[in-house]
Image (spheres, rainbow, N blue to C red):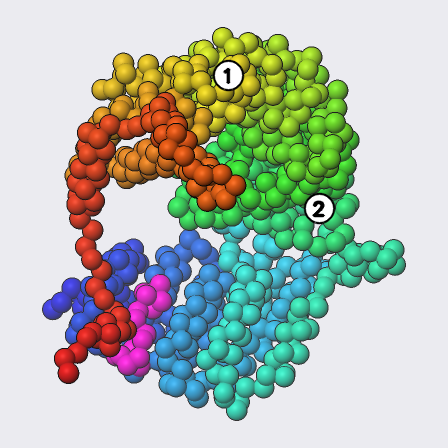
């Protein structure tokens, strides 16, 4: 005898102890996959389905702690787990099981009936044809459920009557008067059992339970999906019944809607009462039943998020204590979600609730744009990880702050943000968030909207008050603790440097009084160990040099530091700073025309000579030369030999990076461009010579020709040595050969074209 047959005997035996029967049913449920796979499934159904039907035909029970009730739940769970796909062994028992389930929905308690409806829908999905004759009983069940919904709502919500007051839905005496008591299994019920010694509350009858009746819509949807082509399905009648249920209201609802209609508004509920009552209910049970608390909190957020989409929410939006309550409720699930201690079944819902909660907060801010305390409190919570940084918050910041047409409102936001930046109580994360997401974007947007003809003269946002606040709160303050709740890059300083660079670039004319502090602010940052902030400070100083008169020795010092630095992750910032300084060299360093030893060429030449073995060092210098070919043309004799000698060090063939290959090609192109410029620079002499030879006014004498030849010979232009040209060409050939790129195969069209142009013998 197999294992499931032994278990079946234990379940079917009336003489067996109830706990033994339950244990056998639980063992079947836990190992169901083993019994229903393969050829044993047919024997399993043949043995156990009749036993299950016989057990479920017994009288319904309404005591949740009853052993017979637990056995019925186990049997229904097994039926729900059985594979019902077609074709299959379950087809022989489909009609008998369906008849039993319909009867249980009418007569049994709400727990069993809910599971029965799920099994019915599962059977419909796979056994549509077999249950074609059962459509009418299904429709009769739905019709009966529709009737019960109307009666239950009237009796329970209007008259506050117990379940047994509903006609035709009486319960046993043990199940009376439980309507206003907590359900068994809830935290409140367990506390009552311990302290007040109340009896276990009975389960309500299925047709008197709003839980079961609420699943009527799911059953209707399944019937429409699986039997939509059936002639027995009166769609119009069912639609009218559904419409009547949707319009069903309790008396208090009808009165509230009528009063709201008389006032020309729409009643959407007493939000304050709902929120406060939910708060009182779930706060007391938080430690007792954690998952229940979080479920209630998440469901409350879902409800409020849905209501935020409609008009008529101004009433509860004016209640600030509701928003405060939502902040308290939202922080707990968020903390457990981040700590990865929230239950698996609640994590997705908590993620959705986190974004929906931010929608509720931003809706409140939309109705109270001048409430800066709430805005900055929310920003602080988000920045410090108490709430997620979700898209709705950034959408609100962009549309209602950055793109706000009120300059005065933007000034208030910026000034308040600068005060927070200077505050010692605010965390570095809050300061970074404010500068990165509010202050810098507002300033950038203001720059975009400035008129072209008077960009720095007529600023829209940057007046004396804002400039003074930035001067006082950023450029004059000390750094603060660099280890304040941050690791890695100090993003607060980086955002402050970004703001400073933007102001110096676009509002330099209004910063005359702050030039000294701006230079001190930038200069103090170049001594940091943080590479990104250090190079960002060089960019700020370079903007300062480009727009203000700066001593030449200071410019040379910055120039030398940038060329000698090893950029690493800050390569783009170093390049940007060098580009800014290069634009001011000819004017600031008193350059002499045709000077072959300008001051800006001394430093690169010295670095290339002394650091030729340090590839990252010379890479920075050579990249700078490539981008400023004209600046170094007159002094190219100092660099061409060094460039030729550095090619193999930069790109060691055949294994080298793409960046190294790119730089080598740029350097060879640079040498070629310099040589081309040298050759093309003598064309005027050639043109003058042709004019003299072709002139009819005077004859070209030998003395004149000799004078021109001597002029060409005595020109002091630098010419690349032949050995350097040969060395460059040899490396170029090796470079091309080392690429090793396979030739792509010809397409069919290309092959045909080549064949058509191939010469033929005649």
Please provide the residue range marked out in magenta.
77-91
Image coordinates for residue 459, horizontal then vertical, percent = 74, 29
Nearest the viewer among 319 and 630 is: 630
Residue matched to label 1: 591
Instruction: Say left or right for 138 vs 257.
Output: left
The part of the image, by quadrant, that contains residue 162 is bottom right
Nearest the viewer among 144 and 335 is: 335
| Circle 1 crowding by C-alpha within 10 Å: few under 14, some 14–19, many from 20 | some
Residue matched to label 2: 271
The part of the image, by quadrant, that contains residue 730 is top left
Outermost right residue: 262
Q: Residue at x 46, y 57 (%)?
A: 63
Image coordinates for residue 427, horizontal then vertical, percent = 54, 20
Q: Quarter of the image for the N terminus: give it.
A: bottom left
Image coordinates for residue 95, horizontal then vertical, percent = 37, 82
Whether 476 is drawn above or below 690: the answer is above
Q: Which mark is residue 443?
A: none
Image coordinates for residue 453, horizontal then vertical, percent = 73, 35
């Amino acid at each position: 005898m197999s294992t499931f047959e032994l278990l079946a005997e234990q379940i079917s035996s009336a003489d067996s102890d109830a706990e033994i029967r339950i244990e056998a049913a639980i063992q079947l449920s836990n190992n169901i996959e083993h019994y229903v796979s393969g050829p044993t499934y047919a024997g399993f159904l043949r043995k156990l389905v009749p036993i299950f039907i016989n057990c479920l035909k017994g009288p319904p029970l309404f005591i949740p702690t009853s052993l017979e009730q637990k056995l019925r739940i186990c049997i229904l769970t097994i039926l729900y787990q059985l594979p019902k796909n077609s074709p299959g062994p379950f087809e022989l028992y489909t009609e008998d099981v369906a008849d039993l389930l319909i009867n249980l929905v009418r007569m049994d308690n709400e727990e069993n009936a809910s599971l029965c409806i799920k099994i019915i829908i599962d059977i419909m999905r796979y056994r549509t044809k077999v249950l074609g004759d059962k459509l009418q009983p299904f429709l009769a069940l739905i019709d009966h459920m529709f009737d019960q919904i109307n009666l239950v709502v009237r009796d329970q919500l209007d008259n506050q009557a117990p379940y047994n007051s509903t006609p035709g839905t009486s319960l046993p005496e043990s199940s009376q008067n439980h309507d206003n008591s907590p359900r068994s299994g809830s935290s409140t019920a367990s506390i009552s059992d311990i302290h007040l010694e109340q009896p276990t509350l009975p389960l309500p009858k299925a047709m008197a339970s709003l839980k079961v009746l609420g699943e009527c819509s799911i059953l209707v949807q399944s019937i429409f999906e699986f039997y939509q082509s059936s002639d027995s399905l009166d769609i119009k009648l069912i639609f009218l019944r559904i419409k009547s249920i949707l319009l069903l209201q309790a008396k208090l609802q009808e009165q509230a809607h009528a009063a709201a209609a008389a006032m020309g508004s729409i009643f959407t509920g007493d939000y304050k009462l709902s929120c406060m009552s939910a708060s009182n209910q779930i706060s007391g049970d938080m430690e007792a039943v954690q998952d229940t608390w979080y479920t209630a909190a998440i469901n409350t957020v879902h409800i409020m998020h849905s209501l935020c989409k409609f008009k008529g929410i101004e009433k509860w939006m004016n209640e600030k204590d509701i928003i405060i309550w939502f902040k308290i409720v939202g922080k707990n699930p968020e903390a457990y979600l981040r700590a990865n201690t929230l239950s698996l079944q609640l994590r997705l819902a908590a993620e959705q609730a986190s974004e929906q909660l931010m929608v509720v907060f931003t809706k409140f801010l939309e109705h109270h744009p001048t409430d800066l305390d709430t805005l900055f409190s929310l920003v602080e919570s988000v920045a410090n990880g108490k709430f997620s940084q979700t898209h709705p918050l950034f959408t609100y910041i962009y549309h209602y702050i950055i793109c706000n047409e009120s300059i005065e409102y933007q000034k208030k936001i910026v000034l308040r943000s600068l005060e927070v930046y200077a505050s010692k109580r605010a965390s570095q994360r809050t300061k970074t968030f404010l500068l990165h997401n509010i202050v810098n974007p507002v300033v950038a947007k203001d720059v975009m909207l400035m008129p072209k003809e008077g960009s720095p003269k007529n600023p829209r946002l940057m007046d004396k008050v804002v400039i003074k606040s930035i001067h006082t709160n950023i450029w004059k303050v000390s750094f603060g603790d660099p280890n304040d709740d941050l690791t890695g890059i100090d993003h607060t300083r980086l955002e402050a440097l970004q703001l400073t660079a933007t102001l110096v670039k676009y509002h330099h004319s209004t910063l005359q009084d702050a030039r000294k502090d701006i230079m001190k602010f930038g200069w103090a940052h170049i001594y940091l160990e943080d590479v990104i902030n250090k190079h960002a400070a060089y960019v700020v100083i370079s903007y300062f040099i480009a727009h203000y008169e700066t001593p030449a020795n200071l410019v040379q010092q910055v120039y030398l530091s940038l060329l000698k630095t090893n950029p690493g992750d800050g390569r783009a910032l170093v390049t940007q700073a060098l580009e800014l300084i290069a634009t001011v060299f000819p004017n600031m360093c008193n350059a002499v025309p045709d000077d072959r030893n300008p001051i800006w060429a001394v430093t690169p030449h010295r670095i290339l000579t002394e650091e030729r073995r340090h590839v990252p060092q010379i890479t920075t210098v050579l990249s700078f030369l490539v981008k400023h070919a004209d600046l170094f043309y007159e002094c190219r004799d100092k660099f061409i030999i060094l460039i030729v000698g550095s090619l193999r060090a930069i790109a060691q063939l055949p294994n080298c990076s793409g960046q190294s290959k790119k730089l080598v090609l740029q350097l060879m192109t640079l040498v070629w461009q310099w040589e081309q410029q040298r050759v093309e620079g003598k064309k005027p002499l050639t043109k003058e010579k042709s004019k003299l030879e072709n002139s009819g006014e005077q004859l070209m004498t030998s003395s004149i020709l000799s004078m021109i030849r001597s002029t060409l010979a005595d020109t002091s232009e630098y010419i690349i040595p032949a050995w350097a040209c040969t060395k460059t060409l040899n490396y170029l050939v090796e470079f091309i050969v080392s690429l090793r790129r396979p030739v792509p195969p010809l397409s069919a069209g290309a092959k045909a074209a080549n064949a058509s142009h191939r010469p033929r013998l005649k």
